[in-house]
Amino acid sequence: MADPITAVESLLLPVMEAVAGRAGVDPVVRPSEHADAQINAALGVAKQLGRPPREVAQEILDQIAASPACQGVFASLEIAGPGFINLVFSDEFLVSSLREIAVDPRLGVTPVASARRVVIDYSAPNVAKEMHVGHLRTTVIGDALARMLRFMGHEVILENHVGDWGTPFGMLIEHLIDLGEDQVAAELSLGDLDGFYKQARNKFDGSDEFQDRSRHRVVLLQSGDAETTRLWKLLVGLSTKHFNTVYDALGVLLTDDDLAGESMYQPLMGHVITRLATAGLLNESEGADVVFVPGFTNREGDPLPLIVQKGAGGFNYATSDLACVIDRVERLGADLMLYVVGAPQQQHLSMVFAVAELAGWLSPPVEAVHVSFGSVLGPDRKMLKSRSGDPMKFADLLTEAASRAGDAVAAKNPDLGAEQRSEIARAVGIGAVKYSDLSTDRVRDYVFDWDRMLSFDGNTAPYLQYAHARICSIFRRSQAADGSGEISLAEIQQLALTTPQERALALGLLAYPSALADTLSTYSPHKLCTYLFSLSQLFTSFYEHCPVLNAPAEVRSSRLVICDLTARTLSHGLGLLGIDTPEQM
RNA sequence: GCCCCUGUAGCUCAGUCCGGAUAGAGCAGCGGACUUCUAAUCCGCUGGCCGCAGGUUCGAAUCCUGCCGGGGGCGCCA
């Protein structure tokens, strides 16, 4: 099953072959303002053949007329301008396509032919630090991609590469000992991780004695000292609890099962160095073990090394990232690895991938992709900060979202009960935050703006959710009237497109599979957002112009089917973005 | 200095991968539409040297080159 434009593309392949005299000519079917779609291939082919474009266009039309497969698909085909072919689908073709997706729980989306094993690395907060706005995009984008890839039939493994290892843990553990475990457990369970971290940091900066203890403690941690490990686990456990609170409030897929922190890769670090040495990639430079990566230079124009073992002997994140690649490819059997990591890491990741390729750990068909993203900015176009000047805390962000949305819901729909209202407020508030993040191209920075994201006008989650809620309202009423809220096969048989709004909406509904495919081809959730917004606009226009419940029986049945499909598509699409669709707002 | 990302309407953004017709939305502004399924909406209007300059092409926001503005990165933090 494919949307009409994709369907026409494949129908036209033999036509183009006949006209151009060779196979594999793209018919260049594109959405059009002048018709349902336009075929642009005539101009290019005409040039190759040295013939007038309109003549070639006419020949394409002749071939289409002669093609049995094309019968009944088009209501009209017209040559326009220099040689464009404007096409209009026949209503019969659209209706029969709609009937197919109306009975399809997958809404016309076929699973991929060859599923990949995909590891998605996202979220990655730091132990003993509170999650803040800097973790928003990776968490929201990674989660949306995970949902989409799973739906397409891929085997998706989530990995939360938490920062649970490194030199800060010496001071954190010493500070934990100073305060007493019970005291710390009580404090941290209240969620004040940042306070704890800052106290430790201040002590570290102000006391030589504390610094010495901290450094010694790092050595103990790295050597696997039992008591130190126990204290470390205590900190990790308390932090994990905090992460889970945030994930739960946000509604993301991540659980403890997905934790794959830096600590996990420590036992593999020596192994990485050995294998790099064996591969002849290891060099010594200024006391450190490094790999020089072709194509990368430093400030002075000299070859830029990736340091894999520090002069003092320790490993760093380059080493653990390499260990990670090995683990994902060789143990997990991944053939696609997505790194949902901020744009500033671009060079680092390129170097890690390049080294992994040089070492032979990463080679086709196995693929590593940096799903990079820009920053979240405040109204001043600088990194979003709270009043105190620190990055805005995630927990505060979500509380404020629900509270602002709650005010709006209370104002617009005062009849709702308190419990129902708070549930809706959560869906709308969290949805708004997620959607505003997902709806702009991830490579760009975006400005975080409460008023805009919570507005019910424009390309926002509330607008899409509202469209969905209005449809649910229609079904509540129709159910009250006839006692059935389910779409029947008989109703699907009544399907007809009698107005321009119904027709436009039908085209939109049929485009869902290709919207999803486009989205995943570049791992760009904003493409799905753009599609869903446009679908909502088509629906509200339909809603204004086409009465459903008061229409004559056959029309009413048909429109109920269209409403049902629209609601399912909106709910499903938003679901893939991790956004809920309440039935009332 | 080198590398990466980015520049489209007053504002926020699609469109750039894969070149096609007078460059699209939304917000804001102006003008209309509520005895009717949620007006949290809809309909219309106004608004653009697509950063600049060359080049390729029948055709460039889209491809190529150079420049300018903004952001980021460039050896032992992760």
Image (cartoon, rainbow, N blue to C red):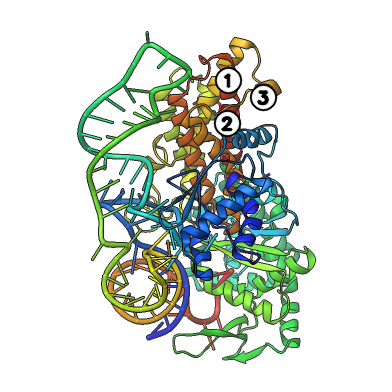
To which chain does the residue with label 1 belong?
A
Quarter of the N terminus of chain A within the rendering: top right
- Of residues A89 and A295, the one drawn nearer to the viewer in this rendering: A89
| Marks 1,3: beta carbons within 8 A | no
Is A475 on the left-hand or right-hand side of A356?
A: left
Type of the residue with mark 2: Ala
Q: Is residue A321 above or below residue A140?
A: below
Q: Position of residue A292 (x, y in %)?
A: 60, 87
Which label was assigned to residue A567?
A: 2
Which label was assigned to residue A475?
A: 1
Type of the residue with mark 3: Gln
Which residue carries the number 3 mark?
A493
The mark nearer the N terminus, 1 or 3, is 1
Q: Circle 2 sits in a helix, a strand or a loop, which is it?
A: helix
- Of residues A167 and A177, the one drawn nearer to the viewer in this rendering: A167
Number of marks drawn = 3
Task: Tell me the crowding category of disc 2: few under 14, some 14 to 19, or many 20 or more residues within 10 angstroms, Cα based.
Answer: many
Marks 3 and 2, how far apart in space?
A: 19 Å
